[in-house]
Amino acid sequence: MTDRALHSWLRLTLVPGVGGEARRRLLKAFGLPDAIFTGGLSALRGVIGSPLADQLLTHDCDAQVAAAIDWAAQPGNHLVTLADPDYPRALLATADPPVLLYVKGDVSLLDKPAFAIVGSRNATRQGELNAEAFAAALSAAGLSIVSGLALGIDAAAHRGGLAAAGSTIAIIGTGADRIYPSGNEALAREIADRGAIVSEFPLGTPPLAANFPRRNRLIAGLARGCLVVEAAERSGSLITARLAADNGLEVFAIPGSIHSPLSKGCHKLIKQGAKLVESAQDILEELRWEAVVAPVAAGVAGNDRSSLLDAIGYDPVDLETLAERTGLTAEQLLAELLPLELDGRISQLPGGRFQRLH
């Protein structure tokens, strides 16, 4: 794409007040952004009305455009427009695809099969372990894990996704040059290095409350299904689940205690028709996904897993104990335990424990 064409795409997205619907109407009427800005005020008014047309032609956003082009020139950064071959096909099929995406990391992940895992920011330790284990298993099966980089379940899902070949995609509600929340800074840098961070918001956009429900539609739009791990009855995660259902996708939920406030959202979804799941295999079977198990680079994959079975023993064991016995990290263990679970050699028990079967 020429600099002039990219300038026009950016300008179209950076004019205040001109939202997604108006942009799509303009693109439908004029074709590419270059034609929009050379089409004349009268023609623009006929499509989006006088106030927006005047704003579109008079607003000066040259400094923002230059900053975005400079940002995209840095290694690993990408600007992906609706006309770009790298634009994810899954989002093209949604009702409100962003005109332009800011991507840090592996842009090719956006067009690979993905699965969404979302849940509470104030998750329990068990909820985080569940999210990480499910994400690692699905990532090892070849699915990229999509979530929102929030604390709690989202962060655990990203860690699990990074543990195996499917990797992870973080959809954020700020500019791609910002990290929010700050507590996830190290995780965000790892995702940018080994996965992808995606934003539709201009550089410098702060964490405005209204942006996070909007980013949820992209999480749902990229995914083939959505798992809610823990969620209160009015959780924002339920918005993502509803959007996924509206897209015709399967929604899954992990049940919990009837006394836990963080189970109420999941139980509500199950009552509404979401699939109750107890293992990643439940999801893979429902999706009719042919798992291609791929090991993590830093793990013990490719070696005889009998040593891992020996470390498990014949009594139920949790990840922390298993990490002490093997010297592996929790992420490495989760990716290594999946093939054993798929082979029927171990079973995952409630409480994040594992039981050897043979």
Image (cartoon, rainbow, N blue to C red):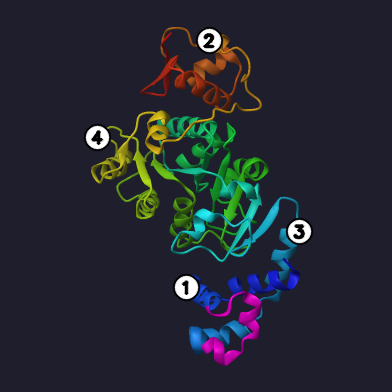
Tell us which disc is closer to us: 3 or 4.
Answer: 3
Q: Does the magenta stretch include residue 41?
A: yes
CA gap, disc 1 and disc 4: 42 Å
Q: Is mark 1 on a helix, strand or loop?
A: helix
Q: Image height check: is 39 above or below 230?
A: below
Which residue matches tag 2?
311
- Name the dominant secondary structure of the magenta segment: helix
Tell us which disc is closer to us: 3 or 1.
Answer: 1
Between residue 131 and residue 24, name the one nearer to us: 24
Considering only order in the chain, which callout, 4 or 2, is on the residue closer to the N terminus?
4
Tell us which disc is closer to us: 2 or 4.
Answer: 2
Which residue matches tag 1?
21
Which residue matches tag 4?
258
- Tag 1: amino acid: Glu
Considering only order in the chain, which callout, 2 or 1, is on the residue closer to the N terminus?
1
How many residues crowd mark 1 within 10 Å: few (<14), some (14–19), many (20+)? some
Q: Residue 262's image quarter? A: top left
Q: Is mark 2 on a helix, strand or loop?
A: helix
How far from the left and from the top, in percent, is residue 163? 58, 31
The label on residue 73 is: 3
Find out whether the residues at labels 1 and 2 contact each other: C-beta distance under 8 Å: no
How far from the left and from the top, in percent, is residue 256? 30, 33
CA gap, disc 1 and disc 2: 57 Å
Considering only order in the chain, which callout, 1 or 3, is on the residue closer to the N terminus?
1
Q: Which residue is drawn at 60% across and 74% down?
A: 12
Q: Image quadrant for the N terminus?
A: bottom right
Considering only order in the chain, which callout, 4 or 3, is on the residue closer to the N terminus?
3
Q: Report the magenta residues as a range.
A: 29-45
Q: What element carries label 3?
A: loop
